[in-house]
Amino acid sequence: MNKKLFVLSVIPISLCPTISFAGPFTDINRLGDLFMVMTPAYALGMTVQAKDFKGTLQLAENIAAVQVATEGLKRIVREERPNGADNLSFPSGHSAGAFSGAMFVHKRYGLKPALLPYAMAAITGWTRVYVKAHYWHDVIAGAALSALFTWVIVEPYDTKISVSADTTGFNFSFKTVF
C-alpha cells in the first residue's frame, strides 16, 4: 500500500475518540461503526488514486445493491436481535457494508491491497456480535451478500503497472487487456 492511501486510512482513526476494549459496549460499537464506513472509504480511495472511474461507479453500484438487499431481507426475515432491541437482526448491515468495500478491493485490485479492509470488516463483524446487536449467522449472511453482489457487479481492474530495481537497473512493465 502506498503512503498516501495509508495516510487516508489512518487519519479518520486518529481523529476519533479513544476506543477502549475494556469500557462499555458503546466504545466497541463505535469501532464497528467507524470500520463499517472506513472500509468502503478505503475502496473509494483506491479507485480515485488509480483514476479508475469505472471502478468508482462499480463500487457505488455494489454498495447500493448490497444495502438494498440487506434492508429488504431484514424486513422479510424479521429476526429479533440478541439484545432484544428490535427484529431487524438478519443480516448484519454493518458487516454487509464493511465486507462490500473489502471484497470490492479484492476483486478489483487483488488480495494484497484487500488485507487491511478485510481485517477492518472482520473486526466490524466481531463488534456487532460482541455488543449483542447480531448473531454470527447475521454477520456471515452480510458478508455472503457482499460476496454475491461483488461477484456479479465488479470487474477486475486489468491494468497492471510494476516497477522494480536490481543490480542491472530499473524494470518497468505495463499490462492491460483491451
Image (cartoon, helix red, strand yellow):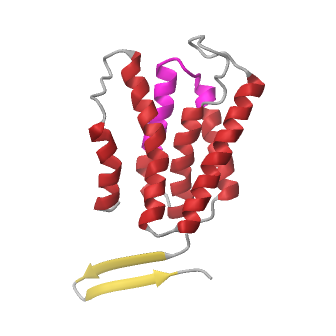
Q: Residue furthest right?
A: 76
Residue situated in front as seen by the camera: 173 or 63: 63
Magenta span dominant secondary structure: helix
The quadrant of the picture occupied by the C terminus is: bottom right
Q: Residue furthest top?
A: 84
The quadrant of the picture occupied by the N terminus is: bottom left
Q: Is residue 5 left or right of residue 69?
A: left
The residue range painted magenta reads 118-139
Q: Could you tell me if residue 66 is visible in this image?
A: yes
Q: Answer above or below: position of 171 versus 5.
A: below
For residue 23, which quarter of the picture?
A: top left
Q: Residue furthest bottom?
A: 168
Q: Could you tell me if residue 114 is visible in this image?
A: no
For residue 156, which quarter of the picture?
A: bottom right
Q: How many discs appear?
A: 0
At 33% across and 22% down in the image, what residue appears?
21
| Residue 137 included in the magenta stretch of the image | yes
Q: Is residue 178 left or right of residue 27?
A: right
Q: Position of residue 20 (x, y in %)?
A: 30, 23
At 66% across and 15% down in the image, what residue appears?
80
Q: Position of residue 91 (x, y in %)?
A: 65, 30
Residue situated in front as seen by the camera: 169 or 130: 130
Q: Position of residue 177 (x, y in %)?
A: 59, 80
Q: Residue furthest left?
A: 167
Q: Answer above or below: position of 65 versus 19.
A: below
Q: Position of residue 79 (x, y in %)?
A: 70, 19
| Residue 135 included in the magenta stretch of the image | yes
At 45% across and 68% down in the image, what residue appears?
50
At 54% across and 20% down in the image, what residue appears?
133
